[in-house]
Image: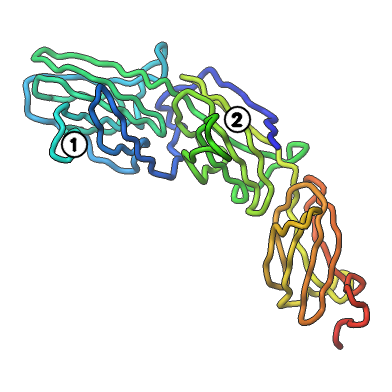
């Protein structure tokens, strides 16, 4: 089931704004082939810490600036610049000759040809440049934007942030399933920088079966805000001797869908989980007694569910005194 309840394109995405923070948690190696040359593995995101600009002795000054789109201003922070030579080494990779972190960078390099890579979050671009004896400027257009994700329950009810996570995947017609994972474990409300394109987003509420899949388009120079709606509820199960009684410890729990698929199992006095809307069968086993109850999950209705002696499959075996 795919449901996209709200997708807002904000046309005032300001590159480098302090509120635009990197949330990507995974390193993604990118090997780029440009004019038949192999770049070394690149972290296609800005690392948490990196030294300042590395200035090399030389007679040519090159200024490098990056933009989200052709008509967008310079990015002032959050960039990682890497400058490579164009002659491969013994490892068949291009040598890294300079790196810097921040916004627009100024490098002193020996005259010649170089490849420059700019990483901005998960977005990046590579360009061949030529350094001469006269100061020169090169601009890279990243063709990138931002994606901000959130989710609510039916009726706009807020979901606790610690129970909500997103995963972002590539969209490919050849891919089976969700496609290649780009960024896992994205927190709600965080902003992820991505190259322009359509991405497959999976929203997980809890850790069982409450998830929503959506395809979301990221536009260059814009912030895309997408809010999906979950039809699920947070439940706590307990086995009691009487209504409102104390939960019985050492109870084994199994939750089955209406087709008989087991979606959750645990052992304890309580079983707490988030379940998607639907019909379920709850099975609780304590000692040699098995209790069973059919139950329907109503979206947004969080509640405690009690299994009673009347739910015992064999009524001849009641609770011991």
The 10 Å Cα crowd at callout 1, few under 14, some 14 to 19, many 20 or more, is few
Q: To which quarter of the image does residue 263 belong?
A: bottom right
Give the numbered dot on residue 92: 1
Residue nearest the observer in this picture, 99 or 38: 38
Residue 215's label in the rendered image is 2
Numbered disc in front, either 2 or 1: 1
Left or right for 311, reference 223:
right
Within 10 angstroms of label 2, few (less than 14), some, or many (20 or more) residues? some
Work out whether 161 lies above or below 78. below
Name the secondary structure under disc 1. Answer: loop
Q: Position of residue 38 (x, y in %)?
A: 24, 31
Q: Residue at x 86, y 88 (%)?
A: 321
Name the secondary structure under disc 2. Answer: strand
- The percent coordinates of residue 210 (x first, y second) are 69, 47
Relative image position of residue 53 (x, y in whole percent): 20, 33
Left or right relative to 17: residue 111:
left
Observer-nearest residue: 179 or 136?
Answer: 179
Identify the image quadrant of the N terminus: top right
Q: Considering depth in this image, is 27 or 187 the residue closer to the camera?
A: 27
Left or right side of 93 for 119: right
């Amino acid at each position: 089931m795919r449901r996209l309840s709200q997708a807002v394109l904000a046309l005032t995405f300001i590159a480098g704004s302090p509120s635009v923070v990197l949330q990507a948690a995974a390193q993604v190696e990118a090997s780029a082939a440009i004019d038949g040359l192999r770049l070394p593995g690149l972290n296609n995101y800005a690392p948490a810490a990196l030294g300042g600009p590395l200035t090399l002795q030389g007679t040519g000054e090159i200024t490098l600036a990056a933009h989200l789109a052709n008509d967008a201003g310079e990015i002032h922070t959050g960039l990682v610049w890497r400058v490579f030579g164009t002659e491969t080494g013994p490892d068949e990779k291009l040598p890294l000759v300079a790196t810097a972190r921040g916004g627009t960078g100024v490098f002193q390099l020996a005259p010649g040809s170089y490849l420059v890579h700019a990483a901005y979050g998960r977005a990046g671009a590579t360009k061949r440049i030529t350094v001469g004896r006269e100061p020169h400027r090169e601009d890279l257009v990243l063709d990138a934007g931002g994606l901000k994700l959130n989710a609510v329950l039916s009726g706009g009810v807020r979901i606790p942030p610690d129970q909500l996570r997103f995963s972002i995947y590539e969209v490919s017609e050849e891919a089976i399933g969700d496609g290649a994972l780009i960024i896992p474990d994205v927190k709600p409300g965080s902003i992820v920088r991505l190259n322009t394109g359509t991405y497959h987003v999976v929203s997980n509420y809890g850790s069982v079966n409450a998830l929503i899949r959506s395809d979301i388009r990221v536009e260059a120079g814009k912030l895309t805000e997408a809010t999906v709606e979950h039809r699920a509820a947070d439940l706590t199960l307990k086995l009691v001797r009487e209504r409102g009684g104390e939960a019985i410890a050492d109870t084994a729990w199994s939750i089955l869908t209406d087709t008989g698929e087991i979606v959750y199992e645990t052992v304890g006095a309580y079983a707490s989980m988030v379940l998607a809307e639907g019909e379920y069968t709850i099975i609780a086993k304590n000692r040699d007694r098995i209790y069973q109850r059919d139950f329907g999950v109503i979206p947004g209705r969080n509640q405690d569910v009690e299994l009673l002696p009347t739910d015992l499959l064999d009524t001849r075996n009641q609770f011991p005194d």
